[in-house]
Amino acid sequence: MVSEGRGRLFRRRDGKYLVYLPKDLAEDSMFPFKVTDSIFVKVSFALGDNKLLIEKWSGS
């Protein structure tokens, strides 16, 4: 079971930001998202905290 991995946050030339997740992490059977193509996610953070929270988008 892979519950953590070294990913990367980077900025593309077009100004968009992407979060890279290692394949072993994203394809682990316990990974919370089942992604076949792409899904919408909500990304949030708390001021002063060094963490991102990524949740499946449940809004319309």
Image (cartoon, rainbow, N blue to C red):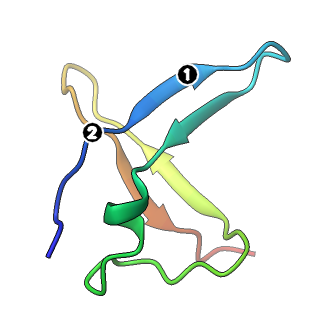
| Residue 37, x across and y down, in percent | 73, 74
Q: Secondary structure at mark 2?
A: loop
Q: Which residue is mark 1?
A: 10
Name the foreground residue: 37 vs 58: 37
Quarter holding residue 17: top right
Q: Which residue is mark 2?
A: 6
Residue drawn 76% across the image and 75% down it: 60
Mark 1 Cα shell of 10 Å, populated few (<14), some (14-19), many (≥20): few
Where is 40 relative to 45, above or below?
A: below
Q: Secondary structure at mark 1?
A: strand
Residue drawn 41% across the image and 74% down it: 27
Name the foreground residue: 29 vs 19: 29
| Residue 29, x across and y down, in percent | 30, 87
Where is 25 relative to 15, above or below?
A: below
Q: Are marks 1 and 2 in contact (CB under 8 Å)?
A: no
Query: Which residue type does callout 1 highlight?
Result: Phe
Q: CA distance from mark 1 to mark 2?
A: 13 Å
Mark 2 Cα shell of 10 Å, populated few (<14), some (14-19), many (≥20): few
